[in-house]
Image (spheres, grey):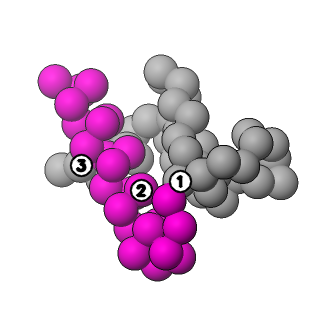
Amino acid sequence: MNEVNITIGILDIQRKILEQTGRKTDVYYSEGQGALYVFMGDALTVQNVIYAVSEMELIMNAI
């Protein structure tokens, strides 16, 4: 069940970023750690991360 909540949390944050910026994102998720968001097509580098979220925050965001 947590996997479903995490997926919903990831998608909800992507939707919010799209609404605020008009740009799509790529997400890099690590189980037990969380997710890093970068604009679609950008390399995963520290400078390109636009949002970082813990796994617990992903779960809480989906509730």
Q: Amino acid at mark 3?
A: Ala
Report the label total: 3
Against 18, residue 20 (above or below) is below
How many other residues sit within 10 Å of disc 1, few (<14), some (14-19) or many (≥20)?
A: many
Crowding at label 3, few (<14), some or many (≥20) Cα neighbours within 10 Å? some
Kind of residue at badge 2: Gln
Residue 59's label in the rendered image is: none
Instruction: Confirm or deny contact between disc 2 and disc 1 (CB under 8 A).
Output: yes
Residue 8, by quadrant, is: top left
The image shows residue 12, relative to residue 9, as above or below, that is below
Please provide the residue range marked out in magenta.
1-24
- Residue neighbourhood size for the residue with mark 2, other residues' Cα within 10 Å, grouped as few (<14), some (14–19), many (≥20): many
Q: Position of residue 2 (x, y in %)?
A: 24, 27
- Tag 1 or tag 2, which sits nearer the N-term? 2
Secondary structure mostly taken by the magenta-highlighted segment of the chain = helix
Residue at image position (81%, 47%) is 46
Q: Which residue is pictured at 60% across the width and 52% down the height?
A: 40
Quadrant location of residue 3? top left
Q: Note whether residue 55 is visible.
A: yes
The amino acid at mark 1 is: Thr
Judged from the image, the secondary structure of the residue bearing numbered disc 2 is helix
Residue that appears at 31% across and 55% down: 12
Q: Which mark is residue 25?
A: 1
Instruction: Tell me which residue sits at (40%, 75%) in the image.
Output: 19
Label 1 vs label 3, nearer the camera: 1
Instruction: Look at the numbered disc 1 and give the secondary structure of its residue.
Output: strand
Which tag, 1 or 3, sits closer to the chain's start? 1
The reply to whether the magenta stretch includes residue 49 is: no
Which residue in the protein does label 2 denote?
Answer: 14
- Is 38 in front, or is 41? 41
Question: Which residue corresponds to mark 3?
Answer: 62
